[in-house]
Amino acid sequence: WCPPREGTPLRAARLAGPAAAAGGGRVGAGGGAREMARAPAAVLLRALAALGLLGARASQETRVLLLRHCPRAPYPADRHPPLAPNNYTHLDDFSAQPFPSSAKWGATAGMCTPNDDFSAQPFPSSAKWGASAGMCTPNGLKLATFMGEMLLTVLGSRQIEAIADDVQRCEDSAVALGLTKHVHVDQALFDPLSAKVSGCAQPDWEGTVTAEVEQARDKLGSARSLLPRLQEILGKGVAPPLSDIPDVVADGYFVGGIRAASESIIETFKLEKTSFMPMAWGKLSDAEFRKLYTVRRTYFEVMYGGRDIAQRYASGILAKLLAVAALPPATVLVGHDIQLEAVHTLLGISWQCGPFATNSTPPLSGIMFTLAENSVKVQSVCPSLQDSSPVVVGGMLRLQTAGASCRRLTFQLC
């Protein structure tokens, strides 16, 4: 796992010829799933073939679904605000109207601090969300239950193993899916460093994030150009406009106007949408939200898209997939958006699913690997936000292994 052990390079099969796109099936009528067409560094998929693991279950397919947890109540304050003098921490400071109050999120008194620094109007309260900060909302758990019923068909097996990160919302999500009677908790699978797995070391956050920022200057410029429109929706709060707050790397974190817009505001809008609450006080269409979500995607790629950081959060997941011979017919791993981003980075895969923007990681979205003899199929899975058909399954990529040759890879699993 992380970090890689010296002298243990993975060898992988190079795909002979172009990958054949796999058609994606849709569960129910809701959707809008599109094929995923790009996998320039699909290391795991080729490594499975080179290590001779794909033929382990020639008589049946093995499916592994990595899923983000349920829609949760937002955190009231950002732990890494912009630098002084712009170090406002609360959402409503940036807005002319409050976000939903704690009553609407459902938190008990004292559990949530109002996030009103960025806004002229308050954001929804915890009572409106029906949950304490960071916990699954009631509607989020209902959505997980609806999705679980449909995932039984998608996974194609009654022998399902569910594994959750050692975080309450992940456990609650796995239980709400209702796919198995017992949910296993395994922190090391999702974050081996936090689980104190032997040999794991903290990545160089400062150097890795700084390098990602330098490579993404154009993307960051495009993201910053969207901040005035976001501010129009928010109105003027007590904090300076988001576009006036500079972006810098400090103590390993990318902080400033883009982070405040991404982590605090746009993420809250997404949580509102997936909890079936009015999004942005009803001022934001789905089409415009997808456009503004570019800010969130750009921030997330810069902050967590570096290879060494991604290795911390994905190495356990990839090691699990490489042990395909020991897997049951279907496995569901319930973690966080950071694990999906890490897999996106290390395997070089992209997706578009349902009503969400490209490479979005909304709650209860994920990536499903279907391992079969001589091929690996990867599909996106996400909620459609339609009662009649709560799950969208999108076709992404199928890699055939016949006639493949091998090459040495720089990526290693520790």
Image: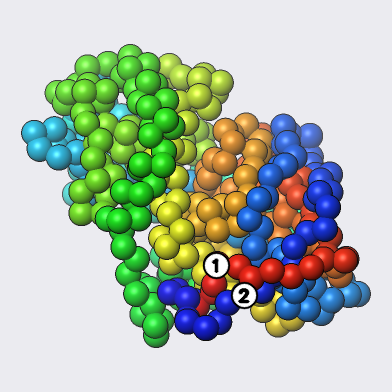
Residue 69 percent location from the top left of the image: 51, 55
Q: Is residue 59 above or below residue 351?
A: below
Q: Is residue 128 above or below residue 231?
A: below
Please indicate whether residue 244 sits to the left or right of residue 99 in the image.
Answer: left
Q: Amino acid at mark 1?
A: Phe
Q: Residue at x 56, y 21 (%)?
A: 287
Q: Residue at x 47, y 81 (%)?
A: 5
Q: Is residue 236 above or below residue 23?
A: above
Q: Can residue 40 be seen in this snapshot?
A: yes
Question: Quick one: 247 or 362, which is closer to the camera?
Answer: 247
Q: Residue at x 75, y 74 (%)?
A: 50
Residue 302 percent location from the top left of the image: 40, 45
Instruction: Decide which of tag 2 and tag 1 comes sooner along the chain.
Output: 2
The Cα atoms of the two marked residues, 2 and 1, are separated by 7 Å
* Residue that numbered label 1 is attached to: 411
Q: Can residue 68 be seen in this snapshot?
A: no
Residue 130 percent location from the top left of the image: 39, 44
* Residue that numbered label 2 is attached to: 10
Query: Dot 2: within a 10 Å radius of its alpha carbon, few (fewer than 14), some, or many (20 or more) residues?
Result: some
Under tag 2, what secondary structure? loop
Question: Quick one: 380 or 199, which is closer to the camera?
Answer: 199
Q: Is residue 131 above or below residue 287?
A: below
Q: Amino acid at mark 2?
A: Leu
Q: Are marks 2 and 1 in contact (CB under 8 Å)?
A: yes
Residue, far left: 85
Question: Quick one: 382 or 386, which is closer to the camera?
Answer: 382
